[in-house]
Image (cartoon, grey):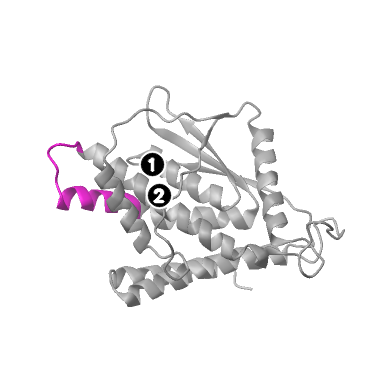
């Protein structure tokens, strides 16, 4: 099986080729290959570690630059879809987020962070391009950028959820991590079903997050002006970023809610 370093190099190369051919069918194919490769990596790592005791890990990520709250929203959406738990550290009396902490099985965390690294830069650049190319004197630039990024994140997370669902059964294992066979939730081979494997992965991530931060609470979104047209443009850009499947429905999914520490 390929290492994470090898996968990263291949994905970066494919995404650069996709960017060079942006807006073309060939560019879509390169992007499809990149994200399908990442999906296969997650499944293979899960199966490789099937006989080991399941463990979760913690990764701390400093959020810097502009729109750190939107950067967190993207990471939280990716982590939630990829069976992890993400915790937010906000700057007091500010919309800024200083740090994110992600908990999960190592192969899920690796995929979420890798995707975040690829998409966060594209998200902020895309929002800036939109406001520069289509100025609107009636809506503030900040409102339009945030709305665009919200649409982008919503569409990306909805489509990523579809891809992960397509691979759910591939996570099926011959036996549980302690060596015993599953029963009522077993897969076609008599072992643990893919859905049960991923459910246990999610529970493991949540348990570790509570262990580190026993007083976690759900974050409350502040009231902000919202620009529907910018949201729509961001969602359309998210649709253009194929995540490994052929064209899927255009339904924009609800965003998962983050957790504050």
Q: Quadrant of residue 97?
A: top left
Could you tell me if residue 199 is visible in this image? Answer: yes
Q: Does the magenta stretch include residue 205?
A: no
Task: Identify the residue at image location x=50%, y=38%.
Answer: 257
Would you say 95 lies left or right of 229 here? right
> Quick check: can you spot residue 4?
no
Magenta stretch, main secondary structure class = helix
Residue farthest right in this picture: 180
**Crowd tier of the residue under label 1, counting other residues whose Cα lies within 10 Å: few below 14, some 14–19, many 20 or above:** many
* Residue 16 x/y as whole percent: 36, 69
> Residue, x 33% and y 76% (percent of image)?
25
Instruction: Kindly identify which numbered label has been placed on residue 153.
Output: 2
- Residue position for label 1: 70
- The magenta segment is 122-140
Q: Where is residue 233 in the image (x, y as percent from the top left)?
A: 27, 52
Single out the residue that lies furthest toward the top: 93
Residue 57 or residue 5, whichever sits in front? 57
As measured in the structure, the alpha-carbon distance from the residue carrying label 1 to the one carrying label 2 is 9 Å
Are the two marked residues, 1 and 2, in contact with CB atoms closer than 8 angstroms? yes
Q: Relative to 10, say whether 52 is above or below.
A: above
Q: Quadrant of residue 176?
A: bottom right
Residue 42 placed where, x, y %?
60, 63
**In which quadrant is the N terminus drawn?**
bottom right
Vertical position of residue 30 compared to residue 216: above or below: below
Nearest the camera: 83 or 124?
83
Q: How crowded is mark 2: few (under 14 residues within 10 Å), some or many (20 or more)?
A: many
């Amino acid at each position: 099986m390929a290492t994470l370093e090898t996968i990263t190099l291949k994905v970066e190369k494919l995404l650069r080729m996709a960017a060079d051919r942006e807006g073309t069918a060939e560019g879509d194919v390169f992007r499809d290959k990149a994200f399908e490769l990442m999906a296969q990596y997650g499944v293979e790592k899960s199966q490789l570690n099937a006989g080991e005791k399941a463990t979760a890990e913690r990764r701390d990520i400093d959020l810097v630059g502009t729109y750190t709250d939107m950067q967190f929203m993207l990471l939280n959406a990716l982590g939630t879809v990829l069976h992890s738990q993400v915790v937010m550290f906000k700057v007091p009396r500010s919309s800024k987020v200083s740090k994110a902490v992600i908990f999960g099985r190592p192969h899920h965390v690796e995929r979420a962070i890798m995707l975040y690294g690829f998409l966060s830069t594209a998200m902020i650049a895309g929002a800036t391009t939109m406001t520069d190319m289509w100025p609107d004197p009636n809506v503030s630039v900040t409102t339009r950028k945030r709305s665009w990024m919200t649409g982008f994140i919503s569409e990306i997370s909805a489509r990523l959820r579809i891809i992960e669902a397509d691979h759910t059964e591939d996570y099926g294992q011959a036996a549980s991590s302690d060596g015993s066979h599953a029963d009522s939730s077993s897969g076609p081979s008599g072992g643990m079903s893919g859905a049960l494997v991923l459910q246990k992965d999610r529970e493991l991530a949540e348990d570790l997050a509570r262990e580190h931060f026993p007083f976690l609470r759900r974050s409350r979104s502040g009231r902000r002006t919202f620009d529907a047209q910018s949201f729509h443009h961001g969602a359309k850009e998210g649709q253009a970023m194929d995540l490994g499947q052929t064209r899927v429905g255009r339904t924009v999914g609800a965003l998962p809610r983050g957790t504050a520490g």
